[in-house]
Image (spheres, rainbow, N blue to C red):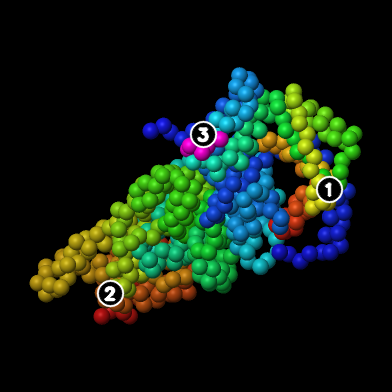
Amino acid sequence: MPGRISRRRIAEYVATELIEAKTSQAKVLQQLAAFLVDTRRTTELTLIVRDIEFQLSQKGYTNATVTSAFDLTAATQKAIEAFVKDKTKAAHISLTTHVDPSVIGGVKVSLPGYEINQTIAHQLTALKTRFKKA
Amino acid sequence: MSELNITDLSADLRSAIEHLESNKNLDEVGIVVRIGDGVAWIHGLRNAGYNEVLNIETPSGVIEAFALNLLEDEIGAVLLGDASEVKAGQTVRLKGTVLEVPIGPELLGRVVNPLGKAIDGGPAIKTKQFGLVEREAIGVMGRKSVHEPLMTGVMSIDAMFPIGRGQRELIIGDRQTGKTALAIDTMINQAKQNTGVVNVYVAIGQKFSKIARLVERLKAEGVMDQTIIVATSPSDPASLLYLAPYAGTAMGEYFRDNSQHALMIYDDLTKHAVAYRQMSLLLRRPPGREAYPGDVFYLHSRLLERSAKLSDALGGGSLTALPIIETQAGDISAYIPTNVISITDGQIFLETDLFYQGIRPAISAGLSVSRVGGAAQTSAIKSVSSHLKLGLSQFRELASFSQFGSDLDEATKKQIDRGQRLTELLKQHQYLPAAVWEQVVSIGAVTNGFFDTVPAPKIKAAQSALQTKLWADHKKDMQELDKGAKPSDDMNALIKKVALSVAKGFEG
């Protein structure tokens, strides 16, 4: 009986297939979906997607999400993209912006497996924790 | 939570907002996948280390956890805080450190939880240093052989199973046989005899009412100032019960590493093993014998190996351990008891039968042992105790014949009488540890035959009268004897003279 393949291995395989483009993207994703249905692991889909994103970022394809309280200007977005490129050395960066008033101010840049959180909400949480411990 | 100063709070808030950390470093993050029974399963954090602290960001602040299961796809982390605030999808970051607790003399006199937070209602504890909860034991060359006595004040122990500084001596017995009482008397004796030994009492899953009574007793005896209590109740999460002995040991190691002497009491390691079993099963680790995980031996061996006598080069400090194990129906061949017996340097075995016969402390002279032995015994007590163990073991062999009183030869009757007197002598009230001189004169009076005319039921009264008379009439000599050196011939003659005169008043 074959052993259970880990999510990490699945993600590595899918990411490699997507980058090498020997098979079409649609076909790769179809194969993945069929595998998950066949092995009754559809509940792990979200986590596998996260792992695929991580593997792609390791191979130079980074998907960054920027969360802020207000809309960012084009110049700010460009600066963030340059910052991400500098930090990750990724060849291809895809930036997605997201407005969330609950962060109050500042920005949060989420990369696969990493994050920079300079929002005011994050600072307040840290402050809350410090006073709780006291 | 301590009283908040609104002015300080608003200044802190302004400062935090103004000086938003320009942290240009990418923090590695993961997310909580599922949470249950105090265990959070986390996706991501590929660089997390074993025992590394993780910060889970909840709306009401950061909850800490530590990583215990490092699997290929996820991490199993045991929560150190309130699990109700942790939800799936929350972000988790690496703290960058392994578990640490505050250490230092600021903890003396306080009751803390395994994370070093005060739970005695006093002010928050601020220490200058932090110690690793999990730390490697000192190597071979950093140690010295155990040669200094740790006086417990319990005559049976100091005379027959002496404990040395740096030794691990197990206290084992069924429930309600006086295990904790022995440990408490040992702590009280450190204050009474001004030994300078710091006590660290680790209460693992003990009722807080019991701990409160203990604190009151220690305060009444003047011991609390040199004691740290690390307390966990049965309602605390298993993670805190698991960490408690290690955290306590980190606190004790501070004194050991600073050329002082500390005494660790783990009450009790049976509950510690049960808490670890619970955590391991929840982490889906394969169960072994009696459902304990395969590394339950290592759980206690790595803890107890940190108790040691350091070499002179490292300061000569020591950390002595008195772990306590509770047995079921006197079965010392069960899994956990045999594990800990094989780790420690001896055991004090308490028997239920002896306890209910009125022999308290209910120490079994036949099953108890101290592997360090005479090397850690004061010369004064060594000079009188050599016949004690022999007398008791001969009495045990002949005890069954005592019912045939009239049919026995004189030598046998004499041995039985001597054994009965010794048994009576070794009974001791709780919270009344005996000083060195008290032990020497009492044991010497019986083993040398000075009290042979005193019937066994009157031995305790005769002992008390002897001690009172010697202290009243020969205080300086007794103070000299209390220093522990082997008594001179003159001292022995004095004790003999007084003992014989006291014995006359109690002849049956």
Q: CA distance from mark 1 to mark 3?
A: 40 Å
Q: Of tags 2 and 3, which is closer to the observer?
A: 3
| Alpha carbons under labels 2 and 3: distance apart | 84 Å
Tell which of B58 and B496 is nearer to you.
Answer: B58
Question: How many other residues sit within 10 Å of disc 2, few (<14), some (14-19) or many (≥20)?
Answer: many
Q: Is residue B59 left or right of residue B131?
A: right
Residue B283 x %, y %: 49, 47
Q: Is residue B214 above or below residue B104?
A: below
What stretch of residues is rendered in magenta? A33-39
Q: Quadrant of residue B230?
A: bottom right
> Does the magenta portion include B161?
no
Q: Quadrant of the N terminus of chain B?
A: bottom right
Lateral position of residue B431 relative to residue B454, left or right: right
Q: Which residue, given by chain and number where applicable, does mark 1 sit on?
A: A69
Which amino acid type is marked by label 3?
Phe
Can you say which quadrant of the picture contains the C terminus of chain B?
Answer: bottom left
B421 or B318, nearer to the observer: B318
Q: Nearer the viewer, residue B112 or B355?
A: B112
